[in-house]
Image (cartoon, helix red, strand yellow):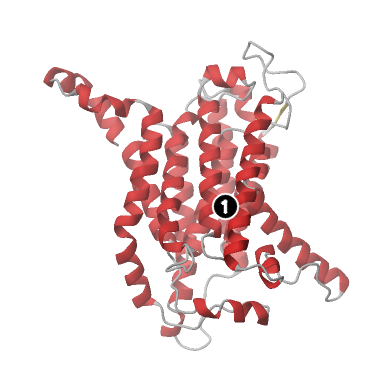
């Protein structure tokens, strides 16, 4: 909004001699990194009063896990409110509206994805948060299939419109539809000609991949949100890595040099990733051990879905799996545990899933689990970024 207002008032500001004071906002890189600072400050400013309000709303019992040992380990968290994701999502939304170019269609879709999943997660969290107010037997959150339906729905919508954007003039044409594989060049060196070996996706394949990735990543982040600071800290690393990829995808020179799909307009998503990183940094202030608040489904569903949407927009679904290795490791541990349990008639691979509980029960302290998973996230992000040169 501020950027668009500056564009509208450009001549007037120049006439009044004020253009020098605000011209730095024309630079996307500045707006992206200022989004980190601004989003961080918003969460700090409203964090304490939001947490106090959530504490007053919390009526109910401690969260129950399917493992008695985990319940004992988590008993101290009984009084900690959830739904802290309103801080994260609210901060990201305000920062996007202020500093992103609101004429860009990629920003429009980012706003829709964030709002959609935040509302779904918020409704689920609210039912859980206030469960003690309602009569016995009333619902304590959305059913799993209901959440999945909404996640698949927004994934389909985002995938459909991203495919359509790539067909419009200036939308990157085939580059906006390629399946970017590891170590594969998108362009012939020194040109913007698509390599003959590159797979260009049709609408069905493109939308299917987008739908599954957005829903899957949303669930993966949700499963990771089980220890103080684990999901927020990991998301900070992923957001900064994705910011670098958005810069490359939106810059013709950088994308040509790295033989990386150039998607015109996607560079503006740097502001979105900056807002995500800043909001999670601010939230970590209150969510570090011992946590004063949990992000809940409000934050985890929205952050995961938004991260995957950005990866689809810049055609880096495979790199997302590497950058978000911790999230997908958590998701895989649940899938493997449930599948093996059913196939083996009650046997388990892990002590408990998601896998962070397995290590906790194995004797690692919660702080050790969280810190080591942060280290894994940082290493995975570095591997993903280094791999850009191996084409």
In the rendered image, residue 184, in percent from the top left (x then y), is placed at: 73, 26
Relative to 388, residue 374 above or below: below
Image quadrant of residue 4? top left
10 Å crowding of disc 1: few (<14), some (14-19), many (20+):
some
- Residue shown at the point (24%, 26%) measured from the top left: 8
Is residue 178 rendered to the left or right of residue 370? right
Relative to 371, residue 108 above or below: above
State the quadrant of the N terminus.
top left
In the rendered image, residue 38, in percent from the top left (x then y), is placed at: 33, 44
Is residue 135 rendered to the left or right of residue 97? right
In the rendered image, residue 163, in percent from the top left (x then y), is placed at: 59, 34
Q: Residue furthest bottom?
A: 136
Question: What count of labels does the image hold?
Answer: 1
Q: Residue furthest top?
A: 190
Image quadrant of residue 282? bottom left
Residue 226 in view here: no
- Residue shown at the point (58%, 57%) measured from the top left: 371
Image quadrant of residue 30? top left
Residue marked by disc 1: 153
> Secondary structure under badge 1?
helix
Is residue 248 rendered to the left or right of residue 68? left
Q: Nearer the viewer, residue 337 or 312?
A: 337
State the quadrant of the C terminus.
top right
- Residue shown at the point (40%, 78%) measured from the top left: 58
In the rendered image, residue 87, in percent from the top left (x then y), is placed at: 38, 58
Q: Residue furthest left?
A: 16
Residue 14 in view here: yes
């Amino acid at each position: 909004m501020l950027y668009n207002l500056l564009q509208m008032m450009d001549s007037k500001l120049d006439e009044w001699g004020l253009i020098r004071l605000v011209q730095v906002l024309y630079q996307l890189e500045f707006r992206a990194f200022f989004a980190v600072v601004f989003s961080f400050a918003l969460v700090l400013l409203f964090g304490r009063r939001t947490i106090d309000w959530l504490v007053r709303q919390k009526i109910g019992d401690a969260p129950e896990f399917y493992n008695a040992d985990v319940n004992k380990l988590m008993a101290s968290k009984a009084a900690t409110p959830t739904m802290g994701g309103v801080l994260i999502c609210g901060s990201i939304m305000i920062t996007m509206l202020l500093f992103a170019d609101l004429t860009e269609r990629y920003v429009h879709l980012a706003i829709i994805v964030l709002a959609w999943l935040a509302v779904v997660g918020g409704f689920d969290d609210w039912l859980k948060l206030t469960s003690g107010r309602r009569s016995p037997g009333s619902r304590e959150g959305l059913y799993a299939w209901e959440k999945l339906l909404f996640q698949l729905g927004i994934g389909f919508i985002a995938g459909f419109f991203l495919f359509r954007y790539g067909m419009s003039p200036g939308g990157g044409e085939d580059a906006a539809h390629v399946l970017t594989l590891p170590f594969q060049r998108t362009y012939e060196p020194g040109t913007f000609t698509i390599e003959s070996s590159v797979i260009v996706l049709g609408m069905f394949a493109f939308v299917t991949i987008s739908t599954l990735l957005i829903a899957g990543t949303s669930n993966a982040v949700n499963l990771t949100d089980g220890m103080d600071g684990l999901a927020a800290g990991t998301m900070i690393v992923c957001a900064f890595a994705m910011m670098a990829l958005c810069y490359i995808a939106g810059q013709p020179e950088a994308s040509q040099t790295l033989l990386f799909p150039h998607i015109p307009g996607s560079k503006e998503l740097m502001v979105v990733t900056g807002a995500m990183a800043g909001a999670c940094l601010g939230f970590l202030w209150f969510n570090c051990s011992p946590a004063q608040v949990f992000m809940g489904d409000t934050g985890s569903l929205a952050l995961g879905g938004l991260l995957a949407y950005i990866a689809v927009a810049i055609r880096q679904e495979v790199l997302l799996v590497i950058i978000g290795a911790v999230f997908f490791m958590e998701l895989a541990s649940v899938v493997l545990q449930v599948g093996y349990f059913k196939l083996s008639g009650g046997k388990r691979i892990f002590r408990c899933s998601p896998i962070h509980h397995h290590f906790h029960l194995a004797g690692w302290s919660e702080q050790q689990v969280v810190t080591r998973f942060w280290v894994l996230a940082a290493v995975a992000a570095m591997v993903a970024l280094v791999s850009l040169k191996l084409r």
